[in-house]
Amino acid sequence: TERSLVLIKPDGVARGNIGEIIGRIERKGLTFAAIELKTVSEDLAGSHYAEHKEKPFFGSLIEFITSGPVVAAVVEGPRAIAAFRQLAGGTDPVEKAVPGSIRGDLALETGENLVHGSDSAESAQREIALWFPNLASS
Ligand code: GTP
Ligand code: MG
């Protein structure tokens, strides 16, 4: 079994899509090891998206992810990291995310694409430690 760090970003919370997104995760067969509504500090946002620090969109990305509460969750199951990336769809909700995916069905803009999911085992370990420091790692 594997764990992934999933976020429902501020647009998803504000639009009332928490239930829809959680439902899709559960329907896939993944389970929740942790879930919490959280206000994101600039510090946490910067650490979470550290890999994008030099990108032109970094400032707007941090502004967006700190603009309102997010749902942070640890999702668990066989191949959970790839499974959630499949559920989420590609980064650009129109050009990359396919219909049937969360972004493909529910989002329009790359900057407001509803969800985050860890992209590798290394990212998942780092992100789970960052968002849920009290969660035992295994
Ligand atoms: P996350 O799950 O949020 O990490 O998305 P991702 O893994 O599909 O994409 P990536 O890690 O490459 O980028 C992180 C986030 O930055 C994306 O979800 C977008 O919201 C934003 N982003 C990425 N590329 C662009 C871009 O070219 N323009 C803008 N405005 N935002 C971008
Ligand atoms: Mg990413």
Image (tube, helix red, strand yellow):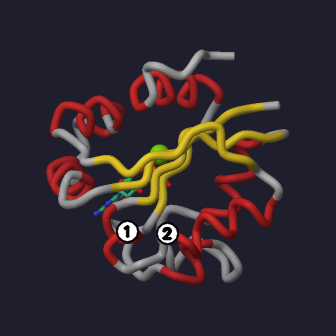
Q: Amino acid at mark 2?
A: Ile
Q: Amino acid at mark 1?
A: Val
Which label belongs to residue 18? Answer: 2
Closest to the observer, 111 or 96: 111
Residue shown at 48% from the left, 75% from the top? 17
x%, y% of residue 124? 57, 30
Q: Is residue 52 left or right of residue 25?
A: left
* The N terminus - image quarter: top right
x%, y% of residue 70? 35, 55
Closest to the observer, 115 or 138: 138
* The C terminus - image quarter: top right
Q: Quadrant of ligand 1?
A: bottom left
**Residue 19: quarter of image:** bottom right
Question: Badge 1: few (under 14), some or many (20 or more) residues near its Cα, within 10 Å?
Answer: some
Closest to the observer, 53 or 40: 40
x%, y% of residue 64? 22, 59
Q: Is residue 51 left or right of residue 106?
A: left
**Residue 50: quarter of image:** top left
Residue shown at 54% from the left, 40% from the top? 5
Residue shown at 73% from the left, 48% from the top? 31
- Height in image: 98 above or below 60? below
The residue where tag 1 is placed is: 13
Q: Are marks 1 and 2 in contact (CB under 8 Å)?
A: yes
Question: Badge 2: few (under 14), some or many (20 or more) residues near its Cα, within 10 Å?
Answer: some
Residue shown at 25% from the left, 48% from the top? 39
Give the secondary structure at mark 1.
Answer: helix
Q: Is residue 37 left or right of residue 27?
A: left
